Image: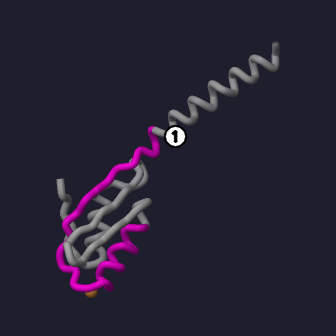
Amino acid sequence: MKILIIVVAGILLWSGGALLADEQHKSQTLNMKIEGMTCGMCEAKVKRELKNLCTEAAVDYKKDWGRCVYEEGKATPEQILNAVKKTGFKGTLIP
Ligand SMILES: [Cu+2]
C-alpha cells in the first residue's frame, strides 16, 4: 500500500512538473525588418547576436529580414530588437 501511494504521488508530481515546464518554455516567433545590411558579413553579425537570445535565428540581408524563435521568459521582443540595434542595424517588428 505504501508503495502504491508513493507511485501515485510520483506520477502526480511528474505530470505537474511537465505542465509547468510546458508553460515556461512556450516558443514565440518574431519576424523583423532589418535595415542597413549590405552583405553576408552583416547578416552573420546580426545572426550571431540573435543566437544569444533565440533558440533559432535566421537572417537574410537581401530581403532586409530576420526571424527569431525565442522562449517566453528567456527573452523579450524589446531585448531582441536591442540586440539588432547593438550590431548597428535598425530592426522593426513585422506584425
Ligand atoms: Cu556587410
| Viewport quadrant of the N terminus | top right
Q: Is residue 41 magenta?
A: yes
Tell whether 27 sits left or right of 63: right
Residue at 63% x, 32% y is 14
Circle 1 Cα neighbour tier, 10 Å, few/some/many (<14 / 14–19 / ≥20): few
Q: Image height check: is 53 above or below 2?
A: below
Q: Position of residue 45 (x, y in %)?
A: 35, 79
| Residue plotted at (27% across, 73% down) | 60
Q: Secondary structure at mark 1?
A: helix
Q: Is residue 47 above or below residue 19?
A: below
Q: Nearer the viewer, residue 75 or 51?
A: 51
Percent from the top left, x then y, of residue 31? 25, 59
Left-right relation of 75 to 90: right
Q: Tell me the residue that label 1 is attached to.
A: 21
Where in the figure is residue 23, as x and y percent of width and height?
A: 45, 38
Q: Quadrant of ligand 1?
A: bottom left
Horizontally, residue 73 falls left or right of residue 92, namely: right
Does 9 appear above or below 59?
above
Q: Is mark 1 within 8 Å of ligand 1?
A: no
Q: Which residues are magenta?
A: 23-51
Quarter of the image for residue 51 reads bottom left
Q: Is residue 57 left or right of residue 61?
A: right
